[in-house]
Image: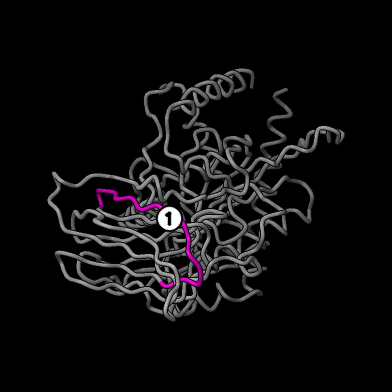
Amino acid sequence: MASRTNQRVLLGVALLCAAALPCADSSRLSAAESPSQPSVATANFPIATAARLAGDGKQTRFILDLDQTVSFRATTLADPYRVVVDVPQVNFQLSPGTGAGRGLVKAFRYGLVMPGGSRIVFDLTGPAKITNSYVLEAANGQPARLVLELEEVDRSAFVQTPAPENRPELRPSVAAAPPATIPAAPEAAPQKPADGRPVVVIDPGHGGIDNGTQSSGESEKNLVLAFGLALRDRLEKAGKYRVVMTRDDDTFIPLNDRSKIARNLNAALFVSIHADALPKAEGDAQGATIYTLSDKASDAEAQRLADAENRADAIAGFNLAEEPTDVADILIDLTQRETRTFSNRFAHLLMGEMKSTVRMHKHPLKSAGFRVLKAPDVPSVLVEIGYVSNKGDLEHLVSEGWRSKAVGSMAQAIDTFLAKRMATAGAGN
C-alpha cells in the first residue's frame, strides 16, 4: 500500500509538470456547477432566426440573421479544414435541417460550446481563407446579420488568422478555475470539514455543439444527460459518495478536460455514458456495451466507435494537442497498468449487474483507445447504454422505467466495486 501511495504522489508531481506546459485556451473551460448561471431557457440571449449559404466552389458567403448585433471571432483550422466562428451565447432558433453545405462548405453545425459562449463550425471542401467578416446592424426592415465571406486558396496560402478586433467575450461559468472545483466561499464564511467520501465522476458524452448520434428526432447528448442525471440522483440519495458531473446541462466539454476533472478530484471511479449508432450499411445491433481502455481495439466495431468518439474535439472546432507523452513515461505506465486492472474489474461487475435488468450486446465487454478513458490513476469505463439506431433500444432509452432499472443496476455495481476497494485500502493502512 505504501508503494502505491508513493507512486500516486510521484505521478501527481509528473502530471502537475505536464499541466504547466502551454495548452489551448479551451483547456481552461470549467465544468464546475455555477448556481448563478442563467439557464438557456430563461436568459435573454441573442436569437439567431435564419442561416444560409450562397456562392460556389471559388467564393462562398455565410449569412446569419440575428435579433441584435453580436461580437465574434472567426478562425481557420486545418486537418480537417474548418472555419470556427465564436460568438457570445446565442439562442439558435433555426429551421430543422439547417446546416447543409454549399460551395466551399460541406456542412456546418452550431451550438453551445461553454456557458456564455456559442460556436458555429464549418467543414470545408478544402483550404480557404476568410476574405471578409462583419456584422450589419438592423436597417430598412432587415435584421442584424453576421456575414462571413470565404475564398478558395491552395494549402501553402492557408493560414490560421483570428480577428483580434472581433474577439468575443466568452465567459466560462468559473473563469480560470480547475475543472469541477467548487467556487471558493467568502473569506468570512467558516471552513466546512473536508468531504472524505469517495468521488464518483459521471460523464454524459457529447453536449453543446456536439450532438453525438441522432435518430428519430432524438440526440445522444440529451439521452445520455438524462441517464447521467438519474444516476447522479440515485447515488446522491444513498449518500455514500461525492458525485461530480462533467456536465449537467447542454454544454460541450473537451475530451481531455473530462478526464482531468476526475484526476483533479482524485476520483475513485469515472463512468462515461454514451449511446451508439450503427451505420445503415453495417446492419443492426442492439444492447448495452461496456468499454475499457486498451492500446489495441478488441474488434473492428470497438475501433470504429473509439475513432468516432475521439473526434469530439474536432467536431466542436477545437485544435487540441495530445497530452504530453514525455513526462514520467515509465511511472505513468506502471500506474496505468494497475488502473486498467481495476477498470476491468469494475467492467465485469457492471456487466454482471446490468445483464439481469438490461439487454446487453452479444459481446458486452470490449476495449479500445478512447481518449476520455486515459486518466492514468482513475479506474474508468465507457458505457454505451444502447443503440439509438435500433428501434427497440431507442424505445428503452427514452423510457423512464427502463432508465430507472438500468441506473439501479449501475448503482449496485458501483457500490460493490467501491466497497471492495475501500476495504482493501483500509486493510493496507
Q: Is residue 205 visible?
A: no
- According to the picture, the residue beneath numbered tag 1 turns out to be 72
Q: Position of residue 262 (x, y in %)?
A: 58, 40
Q: Nearer the viewer, residue 269 or 297?
A: 269
Decide: is 46 above or below 173: below
Amino acid type at image mark 1: Phe
Q: Nearer the viewer, residue 241 or 283?
A: 241
Q: Nearer the viewer, residue 358 or 69?
A: 69
The magenta span reads: 65-80
Asked if residue 271 lies left or right of residue 85, the reply is: right
Q: Quadrant of the C terminus?
A: top right
Which residue sits at x=21%, y=64%? 104
Image quadrant containing the N terminus: top right
| Residue at left offset 57%, top offset 48% | 172
Q: x and y percent of residue 76 in the render?
A: 29, 50
Visible residue check, residue 419? yes
Q: Quadrant of residue 136?
A: bottom left
Query: Does 32 lie within the magenta span?
Result: no
